[in-house]
Amino acid sequence: MAISKNAQEYHDRMFPGYESQFAKTDPEFTELFDNFAFDEVVNQDDLDDKTRLMAILATLLGCQGIDEFKLMLTAAYNLGVTPIEMKEIVYQATAYLGIGRTFPFIQAVNDFCRDNGITLPLEQTGTTNPANRIEKGNQAQVDIFGDHMKGFQNTGPEESRHINKWLAGNCFGDYYTRKGLDYNQREMITFCFLSAQGGCEPQLISHIEANMRIGNDKAFLIKIISQCLPFIGYPRTLNALRCINEVAAKKI
């Protein structure tokens, strides 16, 4: 097999001592994929390994790649992603994907922790309570999206206002206020959830705007989507790139 030196070295960093079964059953495919994903792609830019692996985990959640997610948990751990960060990625995904799609991923992280001698439950990271979750969540919305989000929970038609209240209290108050990830990381993984699942371009555009507002600029988002391309393919990558360019053009 002609696995490149760079691809083999990166693979060994992610999975020390691991022998791929695909290398035995599908050697040509393994050569094509590994040389692309673990040499050409990872050497495209200067994105750090930890951020790359956090983005990949979030992307695999978005596209429901549970088997690959289980494998990449090991790579993420070896390249600096902590169990708490793994948990926070999956927890937050529930607000964007729903428990029907995140349940097996929560189990996967739990299995990973048990297999690696990591005691469960992990340290609690919540910072809100029933009395302040809406207020704190709305403040997170303001911090991320801007002052126009003040009082968002009280806006909209009466028949659907409860959903805006839930967005403030649940999506942002329950998840974004948690310790373990900062706002930049949380918006980055949200960008990955939305890019990978597809079909939610209006929300993707909104969160690209939020990413750029808090410092995750166009160049950074292109780095993220580039590193995730091998895991979601070209159509959803190109859709995300179109949305990035659309938002960036409005800022010129």
Image (cartoon, rainbow, N blue to C red):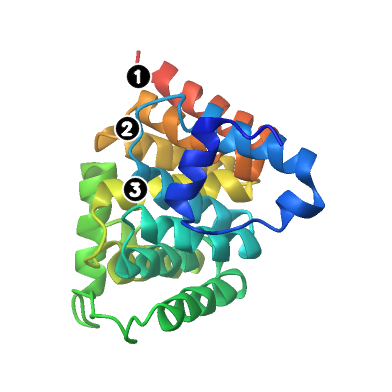
Secondary structure beneath disc 2?
helix
| Image location (x, y in percent) of residue 193 | 51, 52
Closer to viewer: mark 3 or mark 2: 3
Residue 3 appears in the rendering: yes
Task: Tell me the crowding category of disc 2: few under 14, some 14 to 19, or many 20 or more residues within 10 angstroms, Cα based.
Answer: many
Give the alpha-carbon distance from disc 2 to disc 1, as whole Å.
Answer: 10 Å
At label 2, the amino acid type is Met
Task: Tell me the crowding category of disc 1: few under 14, some 14 to 19, or many 20 or more residues within 10 angstroms, Cα based.
Answer: few
Which residue is rendered at x = 53% and y = 50% of the image? 59
Please say if the residues under marks 2 and 1 sit with CB atoms less than 8 Å apart: yes
Quadrant occupied by the N terminus: top right
- Camera-nearest residue between 227 and 185: 227
Secondary structure beneath disc 3?
helix
| Image location (x, y in percent) of residue 198 | 64, 46
Which residue is rendered at x = 25% and y = 68% of the image? 178
Residue receiving disc 1: 251
Q: Earlier in the sequence, mark 3 or mark 2?
A: 3
Residue receiving disc 3: 50
At label 3, the amino acid type is Lys
At label 1, the amino acid type is Lys
Q: Is residue 121 left or right of residue 66?
A: left
Closer to viewer: mark 1 or mark 3: 3
Residue receiving disc 2: 212
Secondary structure beneath disc 1?
loop
- Camera-nearest residue between 163 and 156: 163
Quadrant occupied by the C terminus: top left
Give the alpha-carbon distance from disc 1 to disc 3, as whole Å.
Answer: 29 Å
Q: Earlier in the sequence, mark 1 or mark 3?
A: 3
